[in-house]
Image: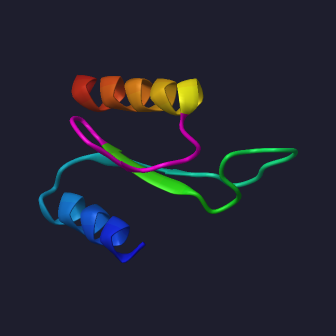
Amino acid sequence: MLEFWRQVDRFLQSEKHCVLALVMRTSGSTPRKKGAQMVISEDHAMGTIGGGIGERQLIHVCQSLLKSG
C-alpha cells in the first residue's frame, strides 16, 4: 500500500498527469471491495480495481484521455 502512494507522489512531483481510480461501492460478489485503488498514467498503471475487461477498458479510456490532453 505504501508503494502505491509513493508512486502517486512520484507522478505528482514529476508533474506527470495521472488518474486515481477508486472503488466507492460494490454489491454482490466482486473481486475487489470498497477502497480498492489504482493509479493510471499515459504509460503505466499500478494497483487494481478488480482486473478483467472492466479494468482494461478503464485503463484504455484513461490513457487515451491523458494522451489527448
Q: Position of residue 40 (x, y in %)?
A: 35, 44
Instruction: Determine the residue positioned at 24% across, 35% down.
Output: 42
* Colour pattern: rainbow
- Where residue 3 sits, quadrant-wise, is bottom left
In magenta, the rendered stretch is 41-51
> Quarter holding the C terminus?
top left
Task: Answer with left or right where residue 38 lies relative to residue 44.
Answer: right
Instruction: Determine the residue positioned at 25% across, 46% down.
Output: 17
- Does the stretch in magenta take in 20? no
What secondary structure do most residues of the magenta stretch adopt?
A: loop
Instruction: Determine the residue positioned at 42% across, 72% down.
Output: 1
Task: Answer with left or right where residue 9 lies relative to residue 51.
Answer: left
- Where residue 50 sits, quadrant-wise, is top right
Q: Residue furthest left?
A: 14
Q: Where 67 sits versus 9, above or below?
A: above
Q: Where 10 sits versus 31, above or below?
A: below
Q: Position of residue 52 (x, y in %)?
A: 56, 30
Q: Nearer the viewer, residue 13 or 48?
A: 48
